[in-house]
Image (spheres, rainbow, N blue to C red):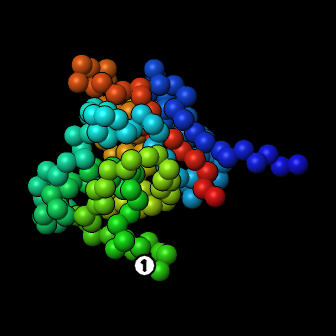
C-alpha cells in the first residue's frame, strides 16, 4: 500500500539558517524538483504586526518607486523585484503572467503584484510560478544556498523558509529562524 502522506519541507535548522539552503535543494532534488512542489505560508507569517511579523521581510512588501536597472522603466506601481517576488510567494502570479494556463514571458521590470494580505495560510503557490517571477530579475529560487551565505538577496523562497533575507542575527532581524513558509507537494 502506498503512503498517502503529503510531502512537506519545513526549515529543519531554524537556529542554523545557513544550512537551510542545501537542505531544501536536496529535498527538491530527491522528490521530483520544483514542478512537484508549492510554497505555503505558515502561521508565523500572518501576525497582528502584519505579514511576516514586522521583520525585514515586512519592509520588502512596500512600494519603493524604483526604476528597473535592466531597462530604465519605472517598476510597476513602485514595487521592486524583491517586492514583486515576495508578493508572488504570498498570492501567486498576477493574471497577466498566465495565458491559457501557460506562463508568459515577463518584462524585465516585472508586473504589478497582487497585494492582498491573506487572512489564512491555505493558499499554495507553485514553485514553478515563483521561479518564473524570479527570472524576470535574473534571480533564481535555487541560488544563495551555500552554507557560507550570509544573505539570500535573490531567493525569496529561502528567505521565507529562514524568516529573513539576512542570515545575520541583529536587533532589527527579529524574525530570523522563524519559518514563514514551508514547501508542500502539489496535488
Is 150 placed left or right of 128 in the picture?
left
Residue at 32% over, 70% down: 106
Q: Residue furthest bottom?
A: 100
Kindly identify which residue carries mark 1.
99
Displayed quadrant of residue 23: top right
Element on which disc 1 rests: strand
Residue 1 in the image, given as x and y percentages of width and height: 88, 48
The residue furthest right is 1
**Closest to the observer, 147 or 38:** 38
**From this viewpoint, is residue 159 visible?**
no
x then y, percent, for residue 92: 41, 59
Residue 174 spot, x, y in % from top left: 30, 24
Q: Quadrant of the C terminus?
A: bottom right
Residue 122 as seen in the image, left or right of residue 59:
right
**Against 21, is 28 above or below?**
below
Q: Is residue 90 above or below residue 76?
A: above
Depth check: 65 or 62 in front? Answer: 62
* Residue in the image at 76% along x and 48% along y: 4
Q: Residue at x 28, y 56 (%)?
A: 115
Seen at 19% across and 64% down, the residue is 76
Q: Position of residue 15 (x, y in %)?
A: 45, 20
- Looking at the image, residue 69 sits to the left or right of residue 4; the answer is left
Residue 187 lies, with reference to residue 17, above or below; the image says below
Amino acid at each position: 500500500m502506498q503512503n498517502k502522506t503529503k510531502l512537506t519541507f519545513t526549515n529543519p535548522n531554524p537556529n542554523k539558517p545557513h544550512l537551510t539552503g542545501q537542505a531544501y535543494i536536496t529535498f527538491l532534488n530527491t522528490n521530483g524538483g520544483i514542478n512537484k512542489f508549492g510554497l505555503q505560508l505558515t502561521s508565523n507569517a500572518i501576525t497582528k504586526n502584519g505579514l511576516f511579523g514586522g521583520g525585514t521581510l515586512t519592509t520588502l512588501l512596500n512600494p519603493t518607486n524604483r526604476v528597473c536597472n535592466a531597462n530604465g522603466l519605472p517598476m510597476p506601481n513602485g514595487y521592486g523585484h524583491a517586492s514583486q517576488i515576495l508578493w508572488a510567494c504570498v498570492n501567486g502570479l498576477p493574471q497577466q503572467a498566465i495565458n491559457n494556463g501557460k506562463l508568459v514571458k515577463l518584462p524585465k521590470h516585472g508586473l504589478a503584484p497582487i497585494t492582498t494580505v491573506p487572512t489564512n495560510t491555505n493558499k499554495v503557490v507553485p514553485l514553478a510560478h515563483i521561479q518564473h517571477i524570479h527570472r524576470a530579475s535574473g534571480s533564481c529560487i535555487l541560488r544563495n544556498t551555500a552554507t557560507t551565505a550570509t544573505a539570500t538577496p535573490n531567493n525569496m523562497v529561502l528567505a521565507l523558509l529562514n524568516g529573513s533575507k539576512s542570515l545575520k542575527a541583529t536587533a532589527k532581524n527579529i524574525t530570523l529562524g522563524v519559518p514563514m513558509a514551508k514547501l508542500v507537494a502539489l496535488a
